[in-house]
Amino acid sequence: MQPISPELREWIVAQLAAGHSVAALRASMHAAGWRDDATDAALAEVERAALGGAPAVAAPAEPAGPARTEMPGPDLEGAPLYIDAGDRRVQVLQTVQHPRVVVFGNLLGGEECEALIAAARARLARSLTVETKTGGETLNVDRTSEGMFFERGENETVQRIETRIARLLNWPLEFGEGLQILRYVPGAQYRPHYDYFDPREPGTPTILRRGGQRVGTLVMYLQEPERGGGTTFPDIGLEVAPVRGTGVFFSYDRPDPATRTLHGGAPVLAGEKWVATKWLREREFR
Ligand code: PD2
Ligand code: ZN
């Protein structure tokens, strides 16, 4: 079992205090090479300490650094309505310039959505959202979405989708993390957050060793709920409907709120929502 260092403990506490979900933390730790059982043990230890009233310690601020020039994204030169993604003609449904947001239609087939859900279902681990009340000492633990990660290229469906994404977004397949699958039941949500790793957090340098920063996100809808569950971008007043087979891409050229990429998953009101998320790194993710 990997030991939990004081720095990691502080990082987890600070992330939770900032309102990040445990699902997001698990994803970050998984991305940094933590085994899921070790992650769960670390989170449980921090939760125990938090319930005992341990204070959250924020790390000193560090600059986000210059904006990147080379970024993932579809070629929208000439304002195409469709993009040839190799094995599929993907629709361009909606675009935003700043932040760069593109909503795609016909990104996944119904059978592909079903295949991902079927393969993921048995492997879902419960993920928690932890909320701190301002000034309060207790953590309110809400069970919300459940999630798992596929290895890159783990099965034929995953491989085919990853190849398509690499072509669509003009970003090497090897720069992508494994697909994350999340299931939301009624009441579940993903509170607004940034997908990049906060440079001010002590755990970030470790995470960045594996492929650098995240620079783009593609959220793909595998199953639509009956009501609720849109992907929201509070800074720009955008909400993307979670329609099966469609997806929303957005990119961030620096790990900074100035990118206006704050986003969240609105509460599911009825039915079940399933998504697959592909995060893109600066470099090869191993
Ligand atoms: O499921 C969503 O709509 C959602 C919202 C915000 C997913 C993510 N973030 C993510 O996977 O990062
Ligand atoms: Zn996100």
Image: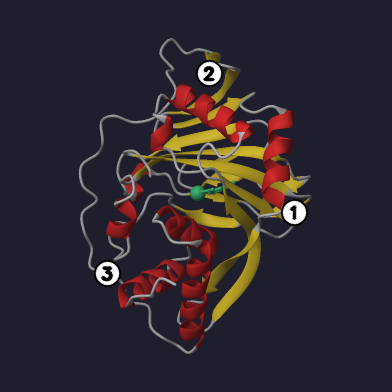
Q: Is residue 269 left or right of residue 86?
A: right
Query: Where is residue 161 shown, x and y percent of the image?
Result: 57, 30
Q: Where is 208 relative to 131, above or below? A: above
The reply to whether the C-beta atoms of the residues labelled 2 and 1 are less than 8 Å apart is no
Label annotation for residue 213:
none
Q: Secondary structure at mark 3?
A: loop
- Who's the residue at 45% across and 88% down the image? 53
Residue 241 visible in this rendered orientation of the protein: no
Between tags 3 and 1, which lies in front?
3
- Disc 1 target residue: 269
Query: Where is residue 147 shown, x and y percent of the image?
Result: 61, 55
- Who's the residue at 38% across and 75% down the image? 3
Q: Where is 206 relative to 69, above or below? A: below
- Disc 2 target residue: 85
Between tags 2 and 1, which lies in front?
2
Callout 3 crowding tier (Cα within 10 Å): few <14, some 14–19, many ≥20: some
Q: Quadrant of residue 107?
A: top right
Q: CA distance from mark 3 to mark 1?
A: 37 Å
Q: Residue furthest bottom?
A: 52
Callout 2 crowding tier (Cα within 10 Å): few <14, some 14–19, many ≥20: some
Q: Does the residue tagged 2 have its C-beta within 8 Å of any atom of ligand 1?
A: no
Q: Quadrant of the N terminus?
A: bottom left
- Who's the residue at 79% across and 45% down the image? 226
Callout 1 crowding tier (Cα within 10 Å): few <14, some 14–19, many ≥20: some
- Disc 3 target residue: 59
Q: Where is 8 relative to 252, above or below? A: below
Task: Of the two numbered discs 3 and 1 on the same chain, state the one appearing first in sequence.
Answer: 3
